[in-house]
Amino acid sequence: LVNQIKKFLKGNQNKKILILGASYRANVKEMAFSGVFDLDAELKKLGFEVEVFDALFSTEEIESHGLNSMSSSTDTFVAVVIQNTSDEFLSMFANPSDWSGLAAIFDGRNLFRGSTPITGIPIFGIGAGD
């Protein structure tokens, strides 16, 4: 996943990525065993600014685990990584103009079933045969 992000965003001046999902699995308030920590660390090693959003956790809870909670507006992110399948994430894309800076979605949980929620924005399904 990290190599795919690096390859696709090579040369892109915007280095801000949003990870959707801090919990180990959707709709369960538990970060133990979550892949968010390794993903966050690997993306930061590549020079990306990473923010995390999960509706189950407050800003303080996310930050107490050493992660940066989402504080930027959606139009500032170059990429989104879907880390779990919370249904709330679907509604975040209801207004495509909110994501004007977005270059790609990396759907690690097949939330969008391979169909991009924003016309013209490529979606990469991780582990979904893509």
Image (cartoon, rainbow, N blue to C red):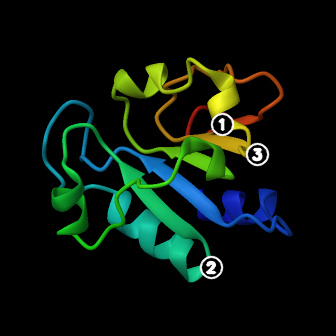
The reply to whether residue 32 is in sight is no
Query: Observer-nearest residue: 110 or 29?
Result: 29
The answer to whether 21 appears left or right of 94 in the picture is left
Q: Is residue 40 above or below residue 121?
A: below
Quadrant of residue 105 within the rendered picture: top right
> For the residue marked with disc 3, what is the amino acid?
Ala
Quadrant of residue 4 within the rendered picture: bottom right
Query: Observer-nearest residue: 97 or 80?
Result: 97
The reply to whether residue 67 is in sight is yes
Reading the image, the residue beneath label 3 is: 103
The answer to whether 68 appears left or right of 91 in the picture is left
Residue at figure coordinates x 34%, y 66% from the top left = 37
Residue at figure coordinates x 77%, y 35% from the top left = 122
The disc, 3 or 2, on the residue closer to the chain's N-terminal end is 2
Q: Is residue 13 above or below residue 106?
A: below
Residue at figure coordinates x 48%, y 27% from the top left = 92
User: Any mark on residue 99, and which?
Assistant: 1
Gap between marks 3 and 2, in whole Å?
17 Å
Query: Observer-nearest residue: 39 or 55?
Result: 55
Q: Where residue 68 sits in the image (x, y, percent)?
A: 36, 66
Q: Where residue 108 sits in the image (x, y, percent)?
A: 51, 41
Judged from the image, the secondary structure of the residue bearing numbered disc 1 is: helix
**In front: mark 3 or mark 1?**
1
Gap between marks 3 and 1, in whole Å?
9 Å
The answer to whether 75 appears left or right of 92 in the picture is right
Question: For mark 2, does the 10 Å Cα neighbourhood hold few (<14), some (14 to 19), or many (20 or more) residues?
Answer: few
Q: Where residue 16 sits in the image (x, y, percent)?
A: 61, 62
Reading the image, the residue beneath label 2 is: 47
